[in-house]
Amino acid sequence: MTEPANRPNRMRFAGAGIELAGAVLVLALIGHGIDRYLNPTRPWGLLLGGLIGFAIGMGNLFRLAKKLNQ
């Protein structure tokens, strides 16, 4: 997805923060659904989904920061 060049950096970082939260939330909910289906007594899918979402979101944030620092 291309971003307009005239958008302020703070708006780009705000969007990246929303992406980070969204990735964590969506993947944690998917993990929770897997937990409910496979083993409702252990939250491993929720935890793993949240961690993967956090890693993906942080990767996007670092990529944006690197792009803006060039």
Image (tube, rainbow, N blue to C red):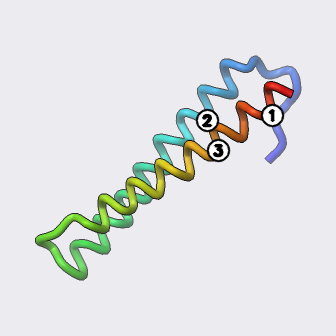
> Between tags 2 and 1, which lies in front?
1
Q: Amino acid at mark 3?
A: Asn
In the rendered structure, the answer to whether residue 67 lies left or right of residue 15 reads right
Place residue 3 in its image quadrant.
top right
Q: Identify the residue position indicated by label 1 in the image.
A: 67
How many badges with numbers are in the image? 3
Mark before the other along the chain sequence, 2 or 3:
2
Specify few, some or many for label 3: CA neighbours under 10 Å numbering under 14, 14-19, or 20 or more.
some
| Residue at the outermost left position | 41
Q: Identify the residue position indicated by label 2 in the image.
A: 16
Helix, strand or loop at disc 1?
helix
Q: Amino acid at mark 1?
A: Lys
Looking at the image, residue 48 lies above or below residue 19: below
Instruction: Kindly identify the residue that appears in the image at 56 percent across and 52 percent down.
Output: 56
Question: Which of 41 and 55 lies nearest the eye of the viewer?
Answer: 55
Q: Identify the residue position indicated by label 3 in the image.
A: 60
Place residue 14 in its image quadrant.
top right
Q: Amino acid at mark 2?
A: Ala
